[in-house]
């Protein structure tokens, strides 16, 4: 029968590559051999022939062994090359493409990507309007109508005017008048007095040059300050933090990248960096409530979506006040790690994800589960810190933690491993490395050949 042979033809065994024109000869097919592993006898085919095509069968073969049966006659043992033989059927097959060297999606997690124990840390900060000097907030009872905070009137004072209040109330005449008015001690007239790290000049109150406590006024003492209505709320200027993405692919998401925000008055809180992948900045606005010392942060993305809130109380009790503010109610675990690490990471870190997970489809599913397991919201917080040390650092600080990984962007990696695709269509849409998920080729030779083709498709081959 007629066979075509090639010498020194080079190809990977898991490749659909087909040779160009070869040399035709007539060879004898040995008796009782299979079409899967035929044996040809020929004296004209050279001993270095390594690849054969039989047009009558439409099959390509690897030459696996050459045996001289005489000085001139040789036997060529062969094994069918199912990928080259059925390349057209393979290309026309529709399958879910798990990985490929072409047409991949950088935002799909690649579970084969090995993470190192090392990481890159990045820090960026932006200032708030909180101040080291702060101001004093004193709520008193008086008989003057006007701005009020419930039954009290709340004044905002700087340190110099707070000292003048002390001098005023310490005056013998004023002191005795307040004793008579309240039938007790003058300090009964003060509901609370706290220090807050909020700006004095930018407070939400109305300027006053006279304060009133009980039935007394401060006209003779030259006290200046501000009086607020209600608890007095001031919105701070928006703070913007530029997000420094490292990889510009799936590794910019958890678990490969994590981030924290330091918020004055609270400390470090975890943020889910996945929520900001469509943003270039983190937008933080905050509200300062002078009357209570409450400080609330609102964390948004570029689209203005509210992602997270965090609250605390930064009021520091002054000895002058009668009201004790509990400074021990800080919420625990605000900086704790997100729960739900996925099992696939064990396989990835061991360098053998396939053994830990299973087939291509299982790996894609594990990758998705990993993203979802880390796609949690950190709990919105409210706690009481108290004390002036809670705002010693008044900047908002972003800290990013970027795991070092193998270079999945490298051309060599993509050429031999591909990257995730997760699209179902004809295999011919791709070139280079291709790995399918549970693919099955129809109308392919014998059952043995079909099983071999399907095994190659689902464990990885080269469509070329």
Image: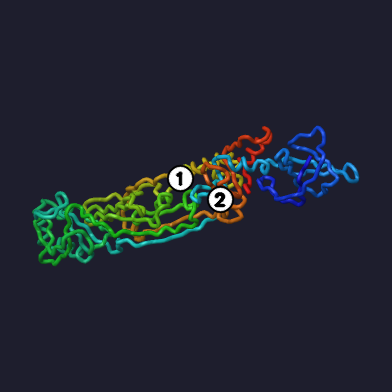
In percent of width and height, residue 280 lies at 40, 57
**Residue at position x 65%, y 41% in the image:** 86
Q: Please say whether residue 443 is visible from this viewpoint.
A: yes
In percent of width and height, residue 286 lies at 30, 55
Q: In which quarter of the image is residue 393?
A: bottom left
Query: Between 151 and 94, which is closer to the camera in this rendering?
Result: 94
Q: Assign a secondary structure to mark 1.
A: helix
In percent of width and height, residue 203 lies at 22, 60
Q: Tell me: 302 left or right of 205.
A: right
Q: Disc 2 or disc 1, which is closer to the eye?
A: 2
User: Residue 102 — which label?
Assistant: 2
Q: Is residue 139 above or below residue 69?
A: below
Q: Earlier in the sequence, mark 2 or mark 1?
A: 2
Residue behind mark 1: 374
Q: Quadrant of residue 288?
A: bottom left
Q: Tell me: 204 left or right of 441.
A: left
In percent of width and height, residue 36 lies at 73, 36
């Amino acid at each position: 029968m007629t066979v075509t042979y090639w010498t020194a033809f080079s190809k990977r065994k898991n490749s659909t590559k087909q040779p160009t024109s070869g040399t035709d000869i007539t060879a004898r097919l040995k008796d009782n051999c299979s079409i899967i592993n035929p044996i040809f006898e020929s004296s004209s085919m050279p001993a270095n022939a390594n690849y054969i095509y039989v047009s009558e069968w439409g099959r390509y073969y690897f030459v696996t062994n050459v045996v001289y049966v005489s000085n001139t006659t040789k036997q060529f043992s062969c094994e069918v090359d199912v990928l080259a033989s059925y390349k057209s059927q393979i290309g026309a097959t529709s399958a879910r493409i798990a990985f490929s060297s072409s047409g991949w999606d950088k935002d799909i997690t690649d579970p084969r990507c090995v993470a190192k124990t090392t990481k890159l840390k990045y820090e960026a900060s932006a200032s708030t309007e909180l101040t080291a000097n702060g101001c004093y907030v004193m709520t008193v009872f008086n008989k003057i109508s006007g701005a009020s905070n419930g039954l009290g009137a709340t004044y905002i004072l700087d340190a110099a005017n707070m000292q003048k209040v002390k001098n005023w109330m310490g005056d013998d005449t004023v002191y005795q008048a307040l004793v008579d008015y309240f039938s007790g001690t003058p300090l009964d007239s003060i509901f609370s007095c706290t220090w807050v790290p909020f700006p004095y000049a930018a407070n939400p109150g109305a300027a006053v040059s006279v304060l009133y406590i009980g039935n007394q006024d401060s006209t003779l003492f030259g006290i200046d300050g501000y009086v607020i209505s209600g608890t007095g709320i001031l919105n701070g200027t928006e703070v913007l933090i530029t997000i420094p993405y490292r990889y510009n692919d799936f590794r910019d998401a958890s678990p490969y990248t994590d981030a924290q925000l330091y918020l004055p008055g609270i400390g470090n809180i975890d943020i889910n960096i996945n929520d900001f992948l469509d943003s270039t900045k983190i937008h933080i606005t905050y509200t300062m409530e002078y009357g209570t010392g409450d400080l609330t942060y609102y964390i948004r993305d570029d689209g203005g979506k509210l992602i997270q809130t965090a609250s605390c109380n930064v009021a520091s009790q002054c000895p002058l006040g009668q009201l004790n503010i509990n400074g021990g109610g800080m919420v625990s675990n605000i900086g704790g790690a997100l729960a739900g690490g996925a099992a696939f990471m064990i396989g990835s870190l061991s360098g053998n994800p396939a053994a830990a997970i299973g087939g291509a489809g299982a790996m894609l599913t594990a990758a998705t589960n990993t993203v979802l397991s880390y796609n949690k919201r950190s709990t919105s917080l409210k706690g009481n810190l108290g004390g002036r040390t809670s705002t010693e650092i008044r900047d908002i600080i972003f800290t990013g933690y970027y795991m070092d990984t193998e270079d999945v962007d490298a051309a060599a990696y993509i050429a031999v491993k591909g990257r995730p695709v997760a699209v179902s269509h004809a295999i011919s849409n791709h070139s280079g490395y291709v790995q399918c998920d549970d693919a099955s080729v129809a109308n392919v030779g014998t059952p043995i050949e079909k099983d071999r083709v399907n095994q190659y498709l689902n464990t990885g081959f080269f469509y070329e």
